[in-house]
Image (spheres, helix red, strand yellow):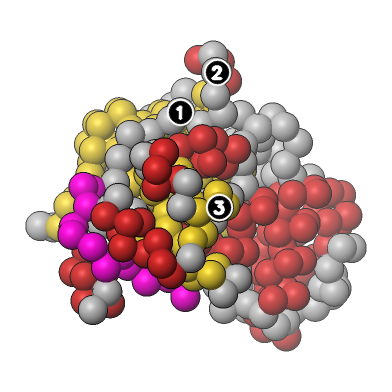
Amino acid sequence: MATAAAAPAPPGPDTRTIELGGMTTMSDILIEARGLNMHYGSKHAVRDLSFSIPKGRVVGLLGHNGAGKTTLMKALCGLAPHEGHLSVLGMNPRADRTVLLQSLSYIPDVAILPRWARVDELISLMAGLHPKFSAERARHLLQRTSVGLSDKVKSLSKGMVVQAHLALIAAIDAKVMILDEPTLGLDVLSRKSFYEMLIDEWCDGERSVLISTHQVEEVESLLSDVMMLNEGQMVLNIPLDQLDQRFVALSHDPAAADAIAAAHPLLRYRQHGQQAALFDGAPPADVQALGQRLRPNLVDLFVALTRAPELNARSAR
């Protein structure tokens, strides 16, 4: 269980970002934001976000409830007004929403499939509404599930409804898929089946998917990149293969605890029964010599970068 460092308050985490996917050209960029802000009444829900997502990426949008994930996703789909620059597939989502939705797929965090409909009726409905929908592909994807074509939505379990929804959405020849907490409330097997179908059947190196979740440990192995929000601000934006270049985790003996704490780690925690510390950047060489280097864990980074400082201070006592 992660606990905060019992030490003087360290400097705030380095919030610099690294553009996802390394070197890219403008033609590779599917989503771009610069100075993006969003307000709901008096609440500043999204604060000065700047990022880009190139093609062929699986990006995790991580944050606690209320961090701004759903607000940002609504802006990407043209469902909410924004300030600043926002481009999705070269279009302004708000102004060009009708055209954009022909090449963008979206599963919101609430169930929207009509409960009265049969699955085959939904396929026919989608085929009539969406020019890039393939009924044949939808039926192929449904064969990976336990959902029958004659089943009514109201007869399906929550996990089956989510799988049916993914099959319908993935049957659209889109370039970007946006998923807002897609597996929330599902059991472990249903979540695993959902992500397996997503990766196997939709991700092809050209399309990109943005997955919003706070179930960090379940998506880490799927992601190419991570963006982390806290209270509407971006606190991390980095390819996963660069995490251990920026962050350093050390396991150490109890005798070294004071020296480790004096180096101001972002987080002190336990891993495999040993005390450990997480640093943004390499600590001094004499501190590194006190421990054994570990691979930074995305869950621990999430705790370190999104936990309120006053909670950290309280739990350290």
Q: Is residue 315 left or right of residue 75?
A: left
Marks 3 and 2, the one that precedes in the sequence: 2
Please report the residue visible at 47 percent of the width from the left and 23 percent of the height from the top.
90
Q: Position of residue 271 (x, y in %)?
A: 55, 68
Callout 1: SS: loop
| Residue sitting nearer the eye, 207 or 250 | 250
What is the quadrant of the C terminus in the image? bottom left
Q: Position of residue 148 (x, y in %)?
A: 85, 73
Marks 1 and 2, the one that precedes in the sequence: 1
Residue 43 figure quarter: bottom left
Q: Amino acid at mark 3?
A: Gln
Camera sees residue 259: yes
Residue at which label 3 appears: 292
Camera sees residue 116: no
Q: Which mark is residue 24?
A: 2
What count of labels does the image hold?
3
Please report the residue visible at 56 percent of the width from the left and 74 percent of the height from the top.
273
Mark 3 or 2: the one toward you? 3
Is 6 within the magenta? yes
Q: CA distance from mark 3 to mark 2?
A: 35 Å
Q: CA distance from mark 1 to mark 2?
A: 9 Å
Looking at the rendering, the stretch of residues picked out in magenta corresponds to: 1-12
Q: Amino acid at mark 1?
A: Glu
Residue at which label 1 appears: 19
The prevailing secondary structure element of the residues shown in magenta is loop
Residue 258 figure quarter: bottom left
| Residue sitting nearer the eye, 113 or 82 | 82
Callout 2: SS: loop
